[in-house]
Structures are given as structure tokens and as C-alpha cells.
Amino acid sequence: MSKNKETLEALSKEYRDTIPADLRKTNTFDWYLQQLYDEPKIARNAHQRVADMFDYYGKTYDEEAGVVEYELASEDPLNDGENTFYGRVIHEAIHEFVNKVKSGARGLGPEKRIKLLLGPVGSGKSDFDRQVRRYFEDYTSRDEGRMYTFRWTNLCDVIHDQDPADDVVRSPMNQDPLVLLPQAQRDKVIEDINAALDAPYTIRNEQSLDPASEFYMDRLLAEYDDDLQSVLENHVEIVRFVADENQRRGIETFEPKDKKNQDETELTGDVNYSKIAIYGESDPRAFDYSGAFCNANRGIFSGEELLKLQREFLYDFLHASQEQTIKPKNNPRIDIDQVIVGRTNMPEYRDKKGDEKMEAFNDRTKRIDFPYVLQYEAEAQIYQKMLRNADLPDIQVEPHTLEMAGLFGVLTRIEEPDNESIDLVQKAKAYNGEIDEADDVDVKKLREEAEKMADIGEGMDGVSPRFIGDEIAEAIMDSMHRSRDFLSPLTTFNHLEGNLENHGSIDEESFSKYYRFLELVREEYKERAIEDVRHALAYDMDEIQRQGEKYMDHVMAYIDDATVEDELTGREQEPDEQFLRSVEEKLNLPEDRKDDFRQEVSNWVSRRAREGDTFNPQDNDRLRRALERKLWEDKKHNINFSALVSSSEMDDEERNQWIDALIEQGYSEEGAKEVLEFAGAEVAKSEMEE
């Protein structure tokens, strides 16, 4: 138990340090004007503030992919990486989303569109939307993201029918204090602050006061004989505005309820019945600005399962997006300023896509595809994050377990290649970046072909990471129940296979295809398991170094049309072509590609020599693999593979050495025994077949 104990004083101080220093303070309108001249960005609109938020937390540019990775998604700095996003396609989607927000910040059009996140279940669109909202809360609490609104004060001193409970009234729409200035005077201020603004956009504000504030302004101006200064000095206080989803300020999440009883007042607000007796039904003070669009003003509106709404209910989104206004019942239009984000799954999108009556809505929508991850190692990181964020039992996840589960997921999502020279597993490996320079695989072309074949886009169908994550969790608990302190790929495969038909989101037509994919993954794992055992049984660093040096001596002689000294006789001889090919064939290099490979490794050695590095075949992945496989071929005939399956048929000391070698590769002791027996049985079977 830790000896350090928190005290209430320390906890209180830590909490206070997280609160903006001016959160409880009130300021004058003149103070606010001076703030704008010092820092014009305070007056940003919602798109501009959200765009700057993404840049604030950091970004990196992947030049090869042409994608900006934003660290609020790729690193999650606020939560120590707990909610990171993985996979090229996801960061492409996030990059596209931010580009639309940034275009909207410049007034190029997307500010008048709904950003519709489209994807299958479990693709990460909801998690990303939630991440954006959490970071917007944090950003607006910082000095760099600060914004202000206003409240009316001392109203009962002037407006005699004002309810005493309403003597102080906060701006119902949390509007920027700039809207208190008439447009002509406001434009002068905006022109001045834009001259000092260091940003790729300009400040704009042509909004009208909300109806209640307009009412107060008119009555107060009448009282003060149109002396705006007196009104603002005597009856307006400027307050800090921090977005808070729980308090429904600056962020609002709208979720469809009963499909048959949807009410537009959920979006636009409704009459405040408790005030009707005081003010009368038509009085703007008797309106309750509690609609979702009202609450989201100055920030983010998030619509969950947007296309599940009735068509008529979506009409409010047309004005909210295009005209940036809402029209409550029996009230004038109200200006709004917010980033409108919608989310929907594939069935609803397909249903609405061909509906001609949805043309106006679709025209005001910018679709951003959130497909499943298509790189199996990135998919494995999703499962790793799941385990990292959980109270994981004392169990070791064996090598290849998560990667092979990820490979299965990817196989269900990618389109079958329209090319006989590459199969589905090879395509998945190509997407994963496993392409040798000599391989004739054009990933860009594969992606383009897949987009043409796919219904909406590649990765928009297939098995959800949730299903695979659930089965990994079940496999872990099953291993614990059986007193196994390790999770192996074999156990995971069994759970995936056994529960495919029990998962409600997988249609029956896909069962046979997915079972076939599982067999492909099993075959891939078999090769990797054998490779690990091969490494353990035959690995000899000194021998690999010696063979590597011999190979390079003969390659250099081959390229230079020279001779090499024979190791035994000391005589000069021609390069040993048979030896060279015995290495290269381990990489399945055909005869007509050998010169390319030899030149490749020669250039690599020369480059390292110029940099002052000594030759080490371990540093060249392709050469290392070729040499390891050759060493395996040289030694495997002296290994009794049948004996690997049973510890009783093998010398304990020799077996323990092999287990230790596998443990060095990341296996647990029991996991090493399992993979040794599994690979031994597979190799013994293939040896018998040969």
C-alpha cells in the first residue's frame, strides 16, 4: 500500500488549478473590446475555433500518404493515449473532416453543410465524435480557446413587468458580446481586429440578437434615449463561456427517441409554460431556449443516428445548415453558429440514398467515410488498447495473437483482388506495408480497383472490431478458467470460429466466406509459428554473419565481374552461383530478378560503408530472412520434428534450450511449449508428405 495519501487541501488546489482564472469574474463591455484588439481570435466563430483546436494539440504530416495526423486522435495527450486511433484509413477520414472544418472556417461553403460521418458499426466514428467534443471542452477552458458571452443585469430597474426572478438573464444563446453592437458599428470593430489578426481566416459576425435579448435591448434603449453606452455599462456583464456537454452549453448531443413521436421543439426550443402567466404567450421572454440547436450555439452539435430521424424532422437541419438559422414555433428566426456533425450507419444511409425526397438534405451534407481499419497491425493496436485500458488478468498474450485476429478482421473487409498475381492474404499484407522493393505490387492501384468494386467504399463492410475484441476477451477468460496463463492464437481462432454464427450483425450469407478466411489466417499463423520455431532451433548469429559475409563477397565479385578466394584452397575462383541462388531462393526470387536483388543489397552495403557502419546481415530484413531460412534448410534434416510433439521423446536439456530461445522471442514458457508442439507437428507432417 502506498504511504502517500492525498489530502483534501491538495485535491482542492489541484482542482482549482484546472479552472480558468476568470471563470467567475464579470467584466464590462469596454473591457471586452480591448480584449478583442489584443487578441482578435477571441471573436472566432465555431468553425474557426474548432479548426484551431485541432492544430493546438499538435499535428504531423505524413508526406508519403499525404495525410495530416492530428495528435488529439493519434496520441490523445489529455488521456495519456487511452483513446488513440489507429490505421491509415481512419486518419484519412479525420484529415478529411478537419479539412472541411477548416474550409468552413474560411467561409468556403462547408460551414453551411452537415458533416456526416458514415461508416459501419464499430468503425470509430462515434469515438472520434466524442473525442472532438471532449477536446473542445478542454480547449475552451484554456486561454488559447477562450470565448465570452454576456448577461443582462438590473432588468427590473427599467422593465417594470419583468419577473424578479429574471432580474439577471444570461444570453439565452450564449452569443458573442459583439452582437450587442449594431451592425454598422460592429463592422468597424471587426475591420480593425482583422487588420491585426494572424490567421488564415477573417473574423465575421452578422448575427442578430436572439429574440429575448432583442426585446431587452429595445426596452433599454428606449429608456436611455438610444444611449447604447449607458445600456451596455449599466445592464450588461461579460462572462467567460466554457463549453460543457453535461451542462448543455456549447456542445449538444442529439439522439433520436421514439421515431413516431419526434417533436421539432427538441431541436429548436419551446414555450416556457411557467412564464406564460407572467409574460403572455407571444412575449419572447416566455420562450425556453432549451432546444439542441440552442444549446450547441458557439460550439458543436452532434446528431447520433441522424438518418433514423423522420424525413419531416430533418427539415430543421436544412435551415440550420444552409441558412444557419432555426425557426421555433411562433417565434422569429434565430441565428446560430455551430459545427453540425451527424453520424449514421450503413443500413440507414443505403435506405435514404436513393430517396428523391431526401435530395435537399443530401445536398446540404458533406459525407466523410469512416471505414474499418484495413491494416491488420493497426487493427491489432485497437485490441491492444482495449486490453491496456482494462483490468487485464495476469495472463500473457502470445506473439501473433492480436495480429492474426486483426488479419481475420481485415480479410472480411477488403475486396477480393481482381488480379491473379496476388491473393487476398497478399493484398492484406500489401496494405499492411509488407512489400519488398522487388515485389511487383502497386498498392495505390489495388485501392483504386477496390473502390470501383465496392458498393460504397472498401472497408465499409465486414466484421467489426467489437466482435473480435469480445472474442479475445472471452478467450482470455476461457484460458483463465482452464488455468492457462497465456492467450495463444489457436485459442483465439477457436473462439472466433465458434461464435461467428452467434453474432447478430453477421449475415448468414457471409458465414462460409468467413470460415474460409479463418482457414487462411490459420495457414498464415502456421507459417509464422514454424518461422519462430525455425529461429529457435536453427538460429546461430555467428553462422549467419559468416554466411552473410560469404554471400556479399560473391555478390560483389558477380557485379564487378571479378573472382573470389576459395575458403579451402585459397585459389581464385568464379562467384559461386549455386550458393548465391541457394540464399535467394529462400525469398522466392525468380532467376530473372536475381540481379535486381544483388544490386539492391550491394547498394545497401556501400551506403552503410560510406556512413561508417560495418556489415551486419541482421540489419537488412530481407537478407536476414534469406540467411535464416537457408540455415534452417541446412540443419532441419538433423532435427526429429516428430519428437517435438512429445516431451517424452526428446532430451530435456535440448528441449529447454529451444523453449528458452522462444521465450526470448516473447513467448511464455507454456506458450513456447504449445507453439513448439504445434509447429513440430506441422513440419513433421510436411516432411512425411515430401
Image (spheres, rainbow, N blue to C red):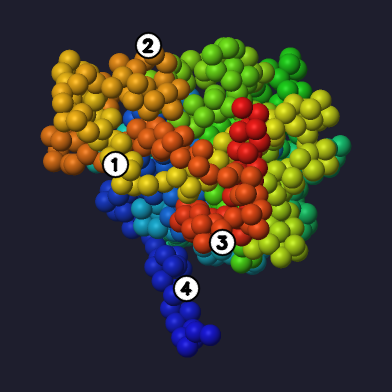
Asked whether the viewer can see residue 334, the reply is: no
Q: Secondary structure at mark 1?
A: helix
Identify residue type, mark 4: Tyr
* Residue tagged 3: 652
Q: Is residue 417 above or below residue 161?
A: above
Locate residue 368: give its quadrant.
top right
Q: Earlier in the sequence, mark 1 or mark 3?
A: 1
Rounded to the nearest whole Å, what is the CA distance between mark 1 and mark 4? 59 Å
Cα distance between the residues tagged 1 and 3: 29 Å
Residue drawn 76% across and 40% down?
497
Q: Nearer the viewer, mark 3 or mark 4?
A: 3
Q: Which residue is mark 1?
A: 545
> Residue shown at 61%/33% (left/top)?
687
Q: Amino acid at mark 2?
A: Asp
| Mark in front: 1 vs 2 | 1
- The spot of residue 662 in percent (x, y) is 50, 53
CB atoms at circles 1 and 3 under 8 Å apart? no
Q: Give the answer, above or below, for where 637 lies relative to 236.
A: above
Among numbered discs 1 and 2, the one appearing first in the sequence: 1
- Relative to the observer, which residue lies in front, 440 or 511? 440
| Residue type, mark 3 in image | Asp
Q: For the view shown, which residue lies furthest in the right direction?
A: 260
Residue 37: x and y in percent read: 28, 48
